[in-house]
């Protein structure tokens, strides 16, 4: 994925995903939701040993506030194990496992 001057990585989200194919299907089904909230792409990793998926979200600069609100909304619902919008590539959480995909929306 090419991160241009108007795109940044916003943070790493860690998900419990004991059944990765089922989790991935639901994740893929929500691409339109991510796009509507400012997301521009993602990197996806899966740690087989821990049964956890890690998503590094990418957002366009002009959509940063919208994307942060979206992350905080789901964090407040307890839908994610850990989610911290950092606004820079120095994430509080590092993705683990094998890279599954890298997509620009």
Image (cartoon, helix red, strand yellow):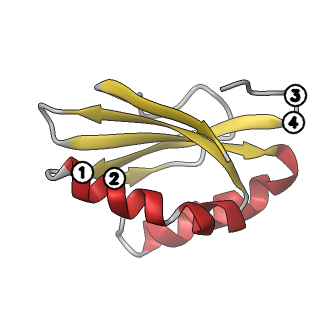
Residue at the disc numbered 4: 6
Name the residue at 66% across, 58% down. 68
State the mark number for residue 24.
Answer: 2
Callout 4–callout 3 Cβ contact below 8 Å:
yes
The answer to which quarter of the image holds residue 23 is bottom left
The answer to which quarter of the image holds residue 81 is bottom left
For the residues labelled 4 and 2, the Cα–Cα distance comes to 28 Å
- The N terminus: image quadrant: top right
User: Would you say 63 lies left or right of 98 here?
Assistant: right
Secondary-structure class at tag 4 = loop
Q: Is residue 60 above or below residue 2?
A: below
Residue at the disc numbered 3: 5
Name the spot of residue 89 as percent of width and height, x first: 63, 27
- Viewer-nearest residue: 30 or 10: 30
Secondary-structure class at tag 2 = helix
Residue at the disc numbered 1: 21
User: Would you say 62 lies left or right of 7 here?
Assistant: right
């Amino acid at each position: 994925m090419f991160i241009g001057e108007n795109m940044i990585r916003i943070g790493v989200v860690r998900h419990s995903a004991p059944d990765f194919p089922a989790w991935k299907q639901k994740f893929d089904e929500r691409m339109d939701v991510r796009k509507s909230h400012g997301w521009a792409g993602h990197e996806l990793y899966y740690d087989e040993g821990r049964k956890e998926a890690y998503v590094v979200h990418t957002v366009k600069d002009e959509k940063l506030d919208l994307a942060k609100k979206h992350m905080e909304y789901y964090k407040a619902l307890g839908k994610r194990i850990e989610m911290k919008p950092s606004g820079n590539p120095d994430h509080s959480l590092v993705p683990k496992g094998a890279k599954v995909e890298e997509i620009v929306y």
